[in-house]
Amino acid sequence: MAIVRSPTQRAWSVARYAGLGVASALFLIPFYLLVRNAFMSDTDLTAPDWYWLPPHWQWSNVTGVFDDPAVPMARALANSVAISVVQTIGVLVLSGLAGYGLARIPYRWSNAVFYTITATLLIPAAVTFVPSFVLVSTLGWISTLRGLIIPGLFQALATFLFRQFFLSFPKEIEEAAFLDGLGYWGTFWRIVVPNSGGFVAAIGTITFIGSWNAFLWPLVIGRDPSSWTVQIALSTYLTAQRVDLAQLFMAALIAILPLLLMFLFLQRWIVEGVERTGIAGD
Amino acid sequence: MPDGGRRRAEAGHGLSAVTTPERPGRPSLARRLRGPQDRTLWFWVFVGPFVLGLLVFVYVPIAWSIYLSFFDAYNTVTPSRFVGLGNYVDMLRDPAFRSSLLTFIVFAAFIVPTTFVLSLGAALLVARTRVMRAFFRSVFFMPVACSYVVAALIWKMSIFSGVRFGLVNTVLGWLGRDSIPFLSVTHPPWYWLVLVTVRLWLQVGFYMILFLAALQRISPTLYEAAAIDGAQGFQVFRHITLPQLRPASTAVILLLLINAFQAFDEFFNILSTFGGYPPYARPPLVYLYYTALGSGQDFGHGSAGAVILTLLIAIVALVQGRLTGIGRAAD
């Protein structure tokens, strides 16, 4: 702020950048190790000597990941893509519609419905995995994509946030649309949704990350290898008796690559999503 | 902006807000806006699919689980032998269940303060930085996109690998120290170091963003007034920043506690081997997973455990809300 800086301020500034630099280096080490290990050969990786970079770049690890008959990585990637995409779109549509209805359509029991939804926010999702497993197994959905996707579509938090967001949506625009005879449905899809891009992107990216990285539910439901997600395939690999370490790291690199790319392009929306979803905690 | 929108909503032109009661003497414009639209029907078109799903996939399982918790239910979800509170008594008497609660307490005692301090510290440093601010923020925030499984892999097999090629042991070797077999020691403290640092790395960025948002909401006039009064450095932090961050801090601590209570991924992936999960360092969800979904499929005890854990979380949330509520009233 001050244009003229005192020596003390200058010293603090140097100390701050030094601290940030060291902390950043520590935070980047795991990513560095992931990439380095992914391109090492197994013998170089487990050798007693330390290599800062792979002495022999093993590009064959990339194909090796998909050739391993014990862990169906290609299938797991396809499952993860299908689950994350369908779940993200599903949550956006279901929670977006419900949030809009709660915010804008007057109805006698609207508040009762709203409390029914928000009450489930008090119950942590992870604790309900036993009852949910019971239900899904009764439906015969174990080891199916249905069982992995459908129970995760009904996110009370997303609905709550959409309702709060639509309450603050400028009403004049909607009134104009109503005058033009669009009705609730038309107003929502043709006026409200196209003007809510940023918020939809924020909720969407957070949902996608959560879905892609989910572990407990896919572990409980994905009993058969054909229904494994990337996370489950990696975890199985990790606890296996004998592993090709370098290949395991390559598999992990492939597993986080889609999210890291998404992170680089959509960081702004992820930040906004974290701010919004985190603020709901108070 | 949000407040303005809400105020307009409450004024009730045309589309009236949910909380506004119907008033018969509205301008005719409002009635025309409603037109032929059947609002009850449209409400359920919008909200119905979500509520139906929530009832089937959240409410039904919870009710079913409470029902199962009063029965002997091995390998079956339609049990016949009613045992009353027997499952609850068994769970509370089970030393393994109680030690899982102790594991949570130890874990929370490490992870909650360290995450809180580091994420607040990172937020304060980043907030005052001008040059390369976006870079530093991204670096701390990037692990949020990483999964617990991938992080567990890096921690277990590369950083804290017990053999010589692990990063920490390599550094120890350069310093002339002996290797530490981090994860093969079955007693504390080494496995706690691994478990706490992995979660720190993954979640510090998330809470840093929450603190950054809260810091931006503090009015600059407060700092200007403090500067006029001659407050400096730590005094400003102590008397302006920290009190202003109170709501955010409360939220962060509650989120940290709830998330620590639900810890599963990193424990499961770091500690379990092809031989199964070791008998120590089992947090509540890991214990529940093996009780209900292990070879025994003991849904009765598993459900009772889930109910107990849910009640515990609710109590923690309520107590914390009450404590901070009193704190706020005293201000």
Image: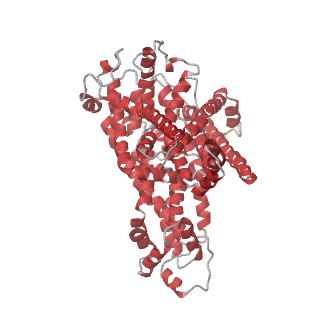
Residue B30 vs A21, above or below: the answer is below
Residue B11 vs B298, above or below: the answer is below
Query: Which residue is drawn at the image coordinates 32% and 43% (left, top)?
Result: A78
Residue B25 visible within the image: yes
Q: Which is nearer the eye, B129 or B102? A: B129
Pinpoint residue A200: horizontal percent, then vertical percent: 43, 58
* Quadrant of the image occupied by residue B263: top right
Residue B295 visible within the image: no
Residue B330 vs B308, above or below: the answer is below
* Quadrant of the image occupied by residue A187: bottom left
Residue B187 vs B30, above or below: the answer is above
Pinpoint residue B138: horizontal percent, then vertical percent: 42, 43
Query: Which residue is drawn at the image coordinates 56% and 53% (left, top)?
Result: A280
Query: Which residue is drawn at the image coordinates 55% and 40% (left, top)?
Result: B121
Q: According to the image, what is the colour scheme of the structure? A: secondary structure
Q: Which is nearer the eye, A130 or A233? A: A233
In this rendering, the count of numbered labels is 0
Q: Which is nearer the eye, B7 or A103? A: B7
Pinpoint residue A27: horizontal percent, then vertical percent: 44, 34
Pinpoint residue A52: horizontal percent, then vertical percent: 33, 24
* Quadrant of the image occupied by residue A46: top left
